């Protein structure tokens, strides 16, 4: 079966300052949209309007590393707006990416499945 080299990650947390969170979301989303290799960048909020879930997917480890450089420009703003309670990375990460996401709660390597 066909697989790919995509890297995905999820972030879960809580909004602590809605204005800062919304500003960060707009700036990060706009910057990420223009990145080569960014495939998904989706922000979700629960019914309580506090609990957040962010899903991101990149073409490969190189694209994910490039995104982290963009993220670093907005990290402080994001953390003024929300907590980052969970950060999970999925895919076959390169040693360079593994080092860059060393603070992740978990890194999960592909074990099976398929891509259509």
Image (cartoon, rainbow, N blue to C red):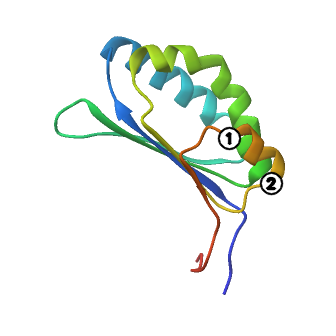
Tell me: 80 left or right of 95. Answer: left
> Which residue is at 34% across, 36% downward?
52
Disc number lying in front (1 or 2): 1
Quadrant into which the C terminus falls: bottom right
Q: For the view shown, which residue lies furthest in the bottom direction?
A: 1
> Which residue is at 21% across, 31% downward?
49
Q: Position of residue 73 (x, y in %)?
A: 66, 18
How crowded pointer 1 is (Cα within 10 Å; few <14, some 14-19, many 20+) is rated as few
Q: Quadrant of residue 70?
A: top right
Q: For the view shown, which residue lies furthest in the left direction?
A: 48
Tell me: 19 left or right of 36. Answer: left
Q: Position of residue 108 (x, y in %)?
A: 60, 61
Q: Position of residue 91 (x, y in %)?
A: 65, 61
Q: Is residue 34 above or below residue 98?
A: above
Tell me: 91 left or right of 61. Answer: left
Q: Is residue 26 above or below residue 65?
A: above
Residue position marked by numbered label 1 in the rendering: 102
Quadrant into which the N terminus falls: bottom right
Q: Helix or strand or loop: what does disc 1 sit on?
A: loop
Residue 39 in view in this figure? yes
Residue position marked by numbered label 2 in the rendering: 94
Q: Helix or strand or loop: what does disc 2 sit on?
A: loop
Q: Which numbered disc flags the more N-terminal residue, 1 or 2?
A: 2
């Amino acid at each position: 079966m066909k697989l790919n080299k995509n890297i995905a990650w999820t972030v879960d947390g809580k909004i602590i300052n809605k204005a800062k969170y919304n500003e960060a979301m707009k700036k990060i989303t706009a910057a990420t949209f223009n990145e080569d290799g960014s495939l998904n960048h989706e922000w979700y909020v629960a019914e309580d309007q506090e609990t957040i879930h962010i899903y991101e997917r990149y073409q490969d480890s190189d694209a994910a590393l490039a995104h982290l450089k963009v993220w670093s420009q907005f990290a402080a703003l994001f953390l003024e707006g929300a907590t980052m309670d969970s950060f999970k990375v999925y895919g076959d990460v390169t040693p360079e990416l593994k080092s860059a996401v060393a603070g992740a709660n978990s890194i999960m390597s592909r074990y099976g499945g398929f891509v259509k």
